[in-house]
Image: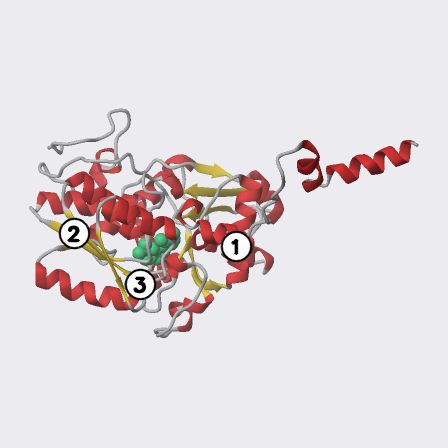
Amino acid sequence: MALIEGSYPVDRPGIIAHYREWLPVTESTPLFSLGEGFTPLVHARWLGDELGLKQLYLKNEGQNPTGSFKDRGMVMAVAKAIEEGASGIMCASTGNTSASAAAYGALAGMQVVVLIPNGNIAIGKLAQALHYGAKVVAVEGNFDDALRLIRVLTEKHRLTLVNSINPLRLEGQKTGAFEVCDALKRAPDYLAIPVGNAGNISAYWAGFKQYRAGGRITSTPRMLGFEAEGAAAIVRGEVIADPHTLATAIKIGNPASWQKAVAARDESGGRIESVTDDEIVAAYKLVSRLEGIFVEPASAASVAGVIKLIRAGEIEPDATVVCVLTGSGLKDPDAAIAHAASLRETAATIEAVERSLGWAEALVAAGEKLA
Ligand code: F0G
């Protein structure tokens, strides 16, 4: 099998090399990699205790090279684009896809063009796309508008479309499901995942089905997809013209893989539900404070959804539940700061620092008690 003439990690396989028997890989597919995949599956004891779930696991996809799960799909889509001799790639994005496309495009030496909804992507993602050298076009419209334009532009200019409507993206992303099963030595009972364009839930379901067909697992999980309430097109059963949510990554009103996600839900005996922004923020804080895992708001939708179903008595306390945490909290520092305690600004003296921490008053009070 060919290796790309270029850089790759020498100390770990990429997902293409590791899972090649399960992927559409040929003799001429480059096995290139930025070290994507093999992310931690954390047994979340503290959050589990809080929710009354003994077997709660968090799949921390924020540890991928560009900080989101998109890298699994992008490495596959870009490898195949190289194999087919493409000159460039293009995508529409709420941010993470653009960062990932820009990084893998840079590694492959390809032209990368991304369309983003102007003013509506987290600052870290924008910084990544620009810094990796992509041409970033900010359109006056939402993600759904940008995706509509991309479908035409990629046809017209013969560039490879690397949104999740490219089936190779889903092929790469299904390796997340393989890793979960490899780690647990079985399939979980429930797999909870945020839903935006609905590609990832479709990819995970394809992965579980393939592993069952290949004899690696004997059961498949119920798929639990969670949309943000202001962008819950699948839950409401209608396209949302003007979606809104603070979780900008999943602010999508017309999910491209809608039918695949519905099939994943129905075939698995699962559900697709919505969570409010308040529920997302509560879960966002809980995951970092209890487990030390900093995620972006959209990623917390999976945890918010599990909290909601647990409270409604719809998940059994002895079930094995995996929540996919799709992206790193560093992507969206504005959201993090807006939902954290405020900064304590002081002069650079011992007394001022103690006062800002409330310690000076505590010492005085203790002194008074002694006197
Ligand atoms: N979580 C994060 C952090 C995302 O960036 C996305 C999608 C999702 C969840 C939802 O995944 O679309 O497969 O249902 N982000 C895309 C983007 C749309 O452009 O980066 P999905």
Marker disc for residue 19: none
Mark 2 or mark 3: whose residue is earlier in sequence = 2
Q: In whole angstroms, how far apart are the C-alphas of marks 1 and 2? A: 35 Å
According to the picture, the residue beneath numbered tag 1 turns out to be 338
Q: Which of 333 and 6 is in front in this view?
A: 333
Quadrant where the image shows the N terminus: top left
> What amino acid is labelled 1 in the image?
Ala
Q: Residue 276: percent from the left, percent from the top?
A: 51, 64
Q: Which of 233 and 132 is in front in this view?
A: 132
Q: Quick check: marks 3 and 1 in contact, CB under 8 Å?
A: no
SS class of the residue under badge 2? strand
According to the picture, the residue beneath numbered tag 3 turns out to be 117
Q: Image height check: is 34 above or below 170?
A: above
Q: In whole angstroms, how far apart are the C-alphas of marks 2 and 3? A: 18 Å
Mark 1 or mark 2: whose residue is earlier in sequence = 2
Q: Which residue is drawn at 38% across and 43% down?
A: 61
Q: In whole angstroms, how far apart are the C-alphas of marks 3 and 1? A: 21 Å
According to the picture, the residue beneath numbered tag 2 turns out to be 89
Q: Can residue 213 be seen in this view?
A: no
Q: Say left or right for 216 vs 315.
A: left
Q: Does the residue labelled 2 lie within 8 Å of ligand 1?
A: no
Q: In which quarter of the image is ligand 1?
A: bottom left
> Which label lies toward us, 2 or 3?
3
